Image (spheres, rainbow, N blue to C red):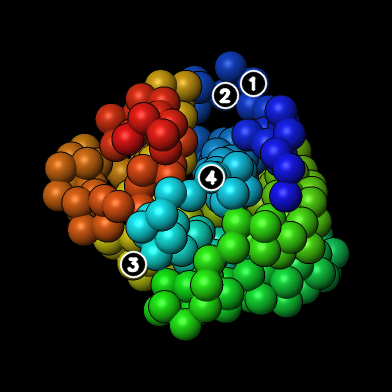
Amino acid sequence: MASTANDKIRFPLIEIADSAKAYNFSTDIPESAHVDMSLIHNVFIRGLNSIYYYAPRIKQGDEVSFAGYALVFTESLHLHHHGEEEILFPFLQEKNDMKHNIEQHDTFKKPLETFGAYMQEVFEGKAEYSGDKVRQQIEAFGDILVEHLHDEISTISPERMAAYDKDGISKLAEKQVEHIRTFPLFRAHPFVMTHHDTKGFPAWPPIPPPVKWLTVNVIWWRHKSYWKFSPFTRYGESQEYTDV
């Protein structure tokens, strides 16, 4: 498959206003919820862009690591959407119809699973790696997924969140934190860290400094061969796979 000049930005990021940097993501929950979601959605979009861009550029011997990297993407995205369907959407449903959001999840679920299954076979040595096949499979769900990631932001705008009582929002936040704690530590944490623009939004994600230190200095190493495909280093610097 021929590459184009727009490979690196095949899927557009969500634009976030500079004024959003003033939020305290631990306390300004009703007002900052849409920014918090925008930032985690951009993590996934960056991951998808990296997979799409590097797919035909993988060096011999890196196929398994690349498949492992792609599997962290699919796993993290699945856990994120599972949390939305089990925790966030039921809460929002009290005042807003979330049926459309769930329907959007269903539109890309099957082709995303197909992609994950192929990456699993490559990871286990049961299938030969093909960059063209990776791109073809991403084309089957990428645009729908990214459109959904953009569209969903408006469902938790400050105006909509103002309709919910703060006690309910606080309990929602506690449930979401508990859900995030179930994510695989050695995969999800480094994935988020190396796909987030820490220089642009250093206060996000709102986790304790010791956890950030642990992620950078200890957790990152477990699957270090995966993170060479990430857009950022563990220190927040931009990187290219060819430079690693």
Residue 144 is situated, as x and y percent measured from the top left of the image, at: 80, 56
Q: Give the CA distance from mark 4 to mark 2.
A: 36 Å
The answer to the question of whether label 2 and label 1 lie on touching residues, with beta carbons closer than 8 A, is yes
> Tag 4: residue type?
Arg
Residue placed at 52% from the left, 72% from the top? Answer: 128
| Residue on which the image places disc 2 | 20
> Tag 3: residue type?
Pro
Picture layout, residue 184 above or below residue 50: below
**How many residues crowd around disc 4 within 10 Å: few (fewer than 14), some, or many (20 or more)?**
few
Question: Going from the N terminus, do you reach mark 1 or mark 3 first?
Answer: 1
| Residue on which the image places disc 4 | 57
Residue placed at 46% from the left, 36% from the top? Answer: 231
Question: Going from the N terminus, do you reach mark 3 or mark 2 first?
Answer: 2
Question: Going from the N terminus, do you reach mark 3 or mark 4 first?
Answer: 4
| Residue on which the image places disc 3 | 184
The answer to the question of whether label 3 and label 2 lie on touching residues, with beta carbons closer than 8 A, is no
Residue placed at 22% from the left, 41% from the top? Answer: 216
